[in-house]
Amino acid sequence: MARANAQAIADSPCVAVLGHYLSSTSLAAGPVYKDARIPALTGSAAADDLTSTNDYYFRALAPVSAQARSIAEHLRAVMGQPKVRLVHTRDSYGKSFERGFAAAYPAEQLRVFGLDVAAGQIGSMDGALDAAAQEPGPGVIVVGAAPDFSADIVKALRRRDIKGTIIASQGAARESYLQNFANEPEEKAHPGFFSENLYAASSLMFDSAGVAAQAFAADYKAKAGTSPSWVAGGAYDAARLMIDALKRADVKNRSDSKIADRDRVRVALAAIDGPKSAVVGLTGRLYFNANRDIPRPIRMGFFHYGRFVTAPLQLVRIDQPDGIDLAAEQEKGHVIAFEDRRYWIQRVVYTGIDIIRVSQIDVKQNSFNVDFYLWMRFAGDDEAQTHVEFPALLDRGAFDPARPMQAGQEDGLSYRLYRISGDFKARFDLHDYPFDTQQLRLHFQNTEQRRELITYVIDRFGLRLADDGSSRAEDGAYSGLQLWRFLGLNYFVESLSSGSTLGKASLFGAEARTEFAGFDAAIMLRRSSAIYMLKNLLPLFLLVLVVFATLFFPETLFRERVTIPVTSILASAVLLVAVNSQIGDVGYTVVVEEMFYIFFVLCLMTMLAGYGHENLRNAGRKRLAVALDHVAQVIYAGAVLAVIVVLYRRYAV
């Protein structure tokens, strides 16, 4: 099917291809694209041969051999180089995985078992898997197979009484992967029968991702109804790369320029080959290497209670060793080396912030008062992970990381619990005031240990989060904010970056930056504009009606037609001063001020209409004077109605 569709695409006017999802279909279609000189870009197909044998195919992730090498190095550095049974398929994907893993893992600790695949089915499975399951001694089983085969292999291994650790390739690194087991009798009888102790490598983990990835996850959830995985993230980044290449390619889009346009797009994609030409993606800058792959860092995750989460220890590649005393760091146990590759050993801190109460929001003073719990769970027993500070906390004595409420062990990890209550500095965006939505951010950062050594991730279990990593359950924590409506509570990982040389000569010419790990909880609130307007703007609405009524006054009330708008301007100016006193000094115009300014203009128009009416009447042109009143009435009513419609369309929920 892939080959047939590829030929139809080759005959069409298209200039590029996004896809395919699977390596098998990408490999089948690749030669057709190459013959037709169509550049193709995939965000998920990982078989090495896809790009290494086809200079028209690009990949927005690392090849499977690099993923396999990362798994091997993780096993050596984090799990102590256990005995490994590698079960792989004998297709292009599985062979690439086997080559990458075997090249990075000690041969004496490795046993390899190959499975034949044909026509989309695994053949001769029983013998190879029986041999793998019967291998004596404990150890780890690594599955090197594409997603269309790996679930069947995991099922077969678990049914052979393999209870220990199984590590799969990136195809398994998503929660939807568990649907492969949902209807199995063992899973129904014992939830987690197949997925407990199941690990997988992934290029994108949303519980440890930054702001851009969290925003993408929320949008994806809102539009698709399900949470994204690395597949959606890879497809999104691939689309961004392709869009950028199309912009650079200057496609002519004519019937006689099809081949030239395709070549231009391929050249534009190939030109995205370094940091200067990179495209910003969900996890950082994206650019291709010489093999048209993007060597993304691989992280390890595991399944627990139906969720796929970041594992407690990770390896972070050292790409810029300038200014780092590698020997000293290696002696401390912070750095490990494999041949010419060096990695930081990064500890993951599962972090949660639970709001107890938000009691006050002071827009004028740019602050808010909040009472909340903070907890951390992490591997090891040292306190480096808890050496954090809240830069926006006004009372620094309200939080002491050395004095937790509770400390101990939880689920095999060190546990620290704090309760923090105080005033926090905030940055309010009042452009839409009083129809504004505000974000109250609780941000902490570790300024002692670099991000490569410590990272804070969202504790999805402890926080009982929705699938997109947000909490929308409103409770008494926000009941005291009568002028505000709670929208949601979002969490994301952040970092503090510093390019300082620290006065070290070794850093004077280096471009390396030091990043410190951080964590954010963002409380989303929307002002109850109806209550605000009833309390503060009702006099303005009455003045609008009073001034409008003057347009219907008879000529005998000419003086009132002029004095009432003047008096209304003065009265509303007093109201505006009162409103501004509530928000303090801001360097821009807010919506409520624009409403007052429009009213001032309407008052001025009413005054001019009154003068015009009187002059026309005195000149004996009474009919024209009446027409002027009608025009002024229509303009006034139309302006007021237009303001109401614009405000409703912009801010009504």
Image (cartoon, grey):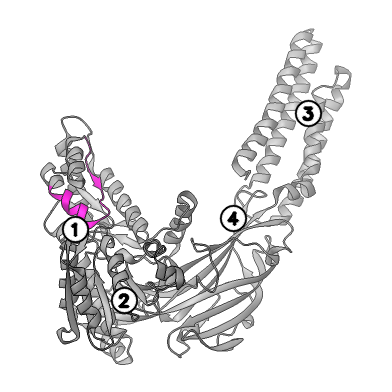
Q: From the viewer's perspective, tell me whether residue 559 is left or right of residue 431.
A: right
Q: Whole-Å distance between the Cαs marked 3 and 4?
A: 33 Å
Magenta stretch in the rendered image: 13-31
The disc, 3 or 1, on the residue closer to the chain's N-terminal end is: 1
- Looking at this view, name the residue that lies furthest to the bottom: 331
Whether 651 is among the magenta residues is no
Q: Report the amino acid beneath label 3.
A: Phe
Give the secondary structure at mark 3.
helix
Q: Whole-Å distance between the Cαs marked 3 and 1?
A: 69 Å
Residue occupying image coordinates x 79% and y 9%: 622
Q: Report the amino acid beneath label 4.
A: Asp
Rendering coords of residue 24 (x, y %): 20, 56
Whether 18 is among the magenta residues is yes
Query: Closer to the observer: label 4 or label 1?
Result: 1
Toward which corner of the image does residue 139 lie, by quadrant? bottom left
The residue where tag 4 is placed is 429
The disc, 4 or 1, on the residue closer to the chain's N-terminal end is: 1
Give the secondary structure at mark 2.
strand
Residue 548's label in the rendered image is 3
Label 1: few (<14), some or many (≥20) within 10 Å? many
The residue where tag 2 is placed is 166
The residue where tag 1 is placed is 292
Query: Closer to the observer: label 2 or label 1?
Result: 2
Toward which corner of the image does residue 52 lie, by quadrant? bottom left
Can you say whether 592 is above or below 108 in the image?
Answer: above
Instruction: Kindly indicate whether the residue at mark 1 contacts the one at mark 4 (C-beta within 8 angstroms).
Output: no
Label 2: few (<14), some or many (≥20) within 10 Å? many
